[in-house]
């Protein structure tokens, strides 16, 4: 019988959560977007379009 989430070690729980995250990320169109998050994304996109020079490229952020 498989252990319950609470019975798993912390390392096993982390792996399970990472697996779930990866499965969800594989289907981005299925993830609901809240109204608040949609407005925030719209605000950020508008700010970027208004002043693109203030943006930081992902490669620079990742290298961080």
Image (cartoon, rainbow, N blue to C red):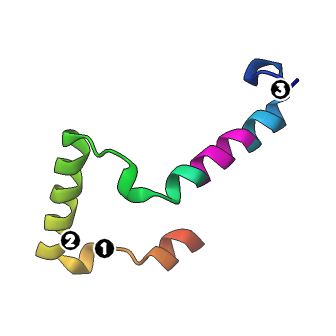
Span highlighted in magenta in the image? 16-22
Q: Is residue 50 magenta?
A: no
Residue hosting label 1: 55
Q: Quadrant of residue 6?
A: top right
Q: Give the side of residue 36 with respect to residue 1, left or right.
A: left
Which residue bears the numbered disc 2? Answer: 48
Position of residue 6 relative to residue 33, above or below, is above
Secondary structure mostly seen in the magenta stretch? helix
Q: Residue at x 49, y 70 (%)?
A: 61
Label 2 – label 3 distance at C-alpha: 44 Å
Q: In the image, what residue occupies the spot 82% across and 36% down? A: 12
Residue receiving disc 3: 8
| Nearest-to-viewer mark from 2 and 3 | 3
- Taking the spot 11% from the left edge, 74% from the top edge, the residue there is 50
Is disc 3 in contact with disc 1, using a CB cutoff of under 8 Å?
Answer: no
Mark 3 nearby-residue class (10 Å; few <14, some 14–19, many ≥20): few
63 relative to 13 in the view: left or right: left
Answer with the quarter of the image where residue 64 lies.
Answer: bottom right
């Amino acid at each position: 019988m498989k252990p319950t989430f609470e019975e798993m070690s912390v390392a096993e729980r982390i792996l399970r959560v990472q697996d779930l995250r990866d499965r969800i990320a594989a289907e981005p169109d299925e993830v609901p977007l809240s109204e608040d998050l949609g407005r925030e994304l719209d605000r950020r996109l508008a700010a970027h379009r208004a002043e693109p020079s203030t943006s930081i490229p992902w490669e620079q952020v990742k290298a961080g």
